[in-house]
Image (spheres, coloured by chain):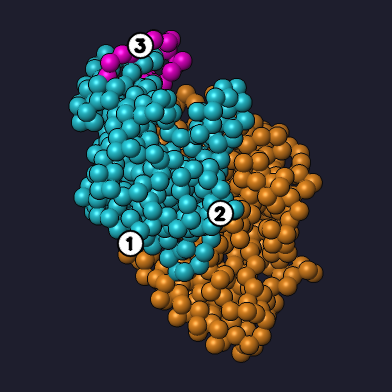
Chain colours: A orange, B cyan
Amino acid sequence: MKHLDEYREAALARALAAELKAAVRGRWTIMEVCGGQTHTILKTGLTALLPDGIELVHGPGCPVCVTPVPLIDAAVELSLRPGITVTSFGDMMRVPGSRRSLLEARAEGGDARVVYSPLDALKLARQQPDREVVFFAVGFETTAPANAMAVWQAARLGVRNFSILVAHVLVPPAIRAIFAGAACSVQALLAPGHVCTVAGYEEYEPIAREFKIPIVVTGFEPADLLEGTLMAVRQLEAGRAEVENQYARAVRREGNPAARRVMDDVFEVCDREWRGVGVIPGSGLCLRREYHDFDAKKRFKTASGEQNSAVLCHAGDILQGRLRPPACPAFGRECTPAHPLGAPMVSSEGACAAYYQYGQ
Amino acid sequence: MAHGSGGRMMDQLIEEVFLPAFGDPVAHERHDGARLDGTIIFCTDAYVVKPLYFPGGSIGELAVYGTANDLAMCGARPRWLSASFILEEGLPLETLRRVVTDMGRAAQTAKVLIVTGDTKVVERGAADGLYITTAGVGFVEFGARVGPALIGPGDAILISGEVGAHGVAVMSVREGLAFETEIVSDTAPLWPAVEKLLRAGAEVHCLRDLTRGGLASALNEIARARGVEIEVQEAAIPVGEAVRGACEFLGLDPLYVANEGRFIAIVKDTDAESALAAMKKFDERAAIIGRVGEEGRARVTMESAIGGRRALDHLSGDLLPRIC
């Protein structure tokens, strides 16, 4: 496959690993933000190629993992109400709320469906005008433009039976919160390539300066991650703390202006609760006033729900890189993908699921 | 739903619910079919695929090939099938006619006779159009004796062709996804390839068709049944370009995607090349993908394309597309 295979070559990976070995002198802890990157690392057994002295820890970049329980409960509750269809990406279906997941709600007669795009949810709303269609809009900056576009189109087309339940989160405020935390041992950051494809990386520059950490915008294939790590290590060894772009084939400093425009038109920044972490100021997106008609929370007045995370689950520490999944006392015992206690064990981008599935 | 997806949960269902209730030693062999009396193999399977038609096949073909293939995986030439139909009230007669015509054609291709059957109609909403159950009888040929119990350390693992096409073909219709290249199901009878393999004289220890749960689940079942480690190489596993692209796009792993016309053969290591030559006569993408490792730790490991090693686990739950 063009554009992918060349970054998965064994020879290239070995060459980068050798360069990395030659570059490392100190001991460094580096965090990759995105769950997709975590999965590549474990799926390809990439850690086996890393020299001694480099430890990769996993960050908060799993969108369904950080979606707060009350919002999942709201989606579940809506799916069980007559006349309402709740749509979402496949990942979201299995994530446990306080009592059940969307899949379990469906087994009980709820109407919860997987869609591949928010525009498919909008299409569904137009096909069944007698039902309300709610799209559960989760994700980082990566999914925000398409979700914004669905609302923008619904407004232009006058589709009155479509709304979204917004759970959008933003990466830079979360990173800032992690670095400002007392227990943070992370010395460099591999920034999420696809988030930056949309949002660019200007916002990361003050973070690198303030916390004196190198940040490298990094892609998702094995060679990307090795090269991103190498660039971070070179900065660390040289005492630099800048933002660099490893993923230049997809990311520009200013991001994607068209995508940012539609995001800005539909959404505004708001405070947001992160599951297992708490409220992070300015870390979420909400619908602007002009689009309040499309806000499912306002339209259906959902119960606010209760926080009821399993006591055994350490998802918050996992998501902030303070605990490695296998070190969690519940990992692989009380908590498995079939019986997850927390979201990181469920999602295809969750760190716990990656460790469980690939057996590291 | 995940109890039916061919992964860990289905395994649990069989072990915790069915086996204790039925308890027969033949059932405990956990093979695709039961060896009744010397050379007679008996098996059954139910077909509930949605949609009824998909690129490259239909529920009718699946119902014939699927059961015939279960027989072939026991080293048996498929001979006779039964067919039972559960029809939802209101199913157009034309649809039924098409499906049955497909079954007749598939039976000819697979050289089996459909000799008995039954039909029930249930009220609207109690079934999804049409369900089919077929059972089959066949005879073991070439004195083949195959099953997970017979594999041993060092055995070679071969695959009969590219994986993942059926699951992606069905999903593309079910979800209304269009890809630039149409992906066509691999639905096909397997006995002809098995016969070639057995006739070539290779010492075949185990055969397993890859259905729901894909290659990864089949390997895990075998590893658990025999209590051995199985080691495969990612780079050796053939996956078609279009299937790879579709899976990449949807966030699926082709090693977990369903197949309907692919099998793995586990053969004595010294017979690996002759077995491969026989299988390549049917599909040039047949390949040696790994070997049976040591006894003691029942698991499947895979060497990744970049040289790392990791577990290739059972599928947990249904395959669901990812967010981003």
Determine which of the numbered discs, if any, sits on residue A9 in the image.
none
As displayed, is residue A52 above or below residue B320? below
Chain that bears disc 1: A
Identify the residue position indicated by label 1 in the image. Answer: A1
The label nearer to you, 2 versus 3, is 2
User: Is residue A58 located in the magenta-colored stretch of the structure?
Assistant: no
Q: Alpha-carbon neighbours of circle 2 within 10 Å: few (<14), some, or many (≥20)? A: some
As displayed, is residue B312 above or below residue B129? below
Identify the residue position indicated by label 3 in the image. Answer: B118
Residue type, label 3: Asp
How far apart marks 3 and 1 lie (CA) works out to 48 Å
Secondary structure state at the residue bearing disc 1: loop
Chain that bears disc 2: B
Identify the residue position indicated by label 2 in the image. Answer: B295
Q: Alpha-carbon neighbours of circle 1 within 10 Å: few (<14), some, or many (≥20)? A: few
* Front residue (pair B21, A259): B21
Which range is magenta? B114-132
* Front residue (pair A104, B217): B217
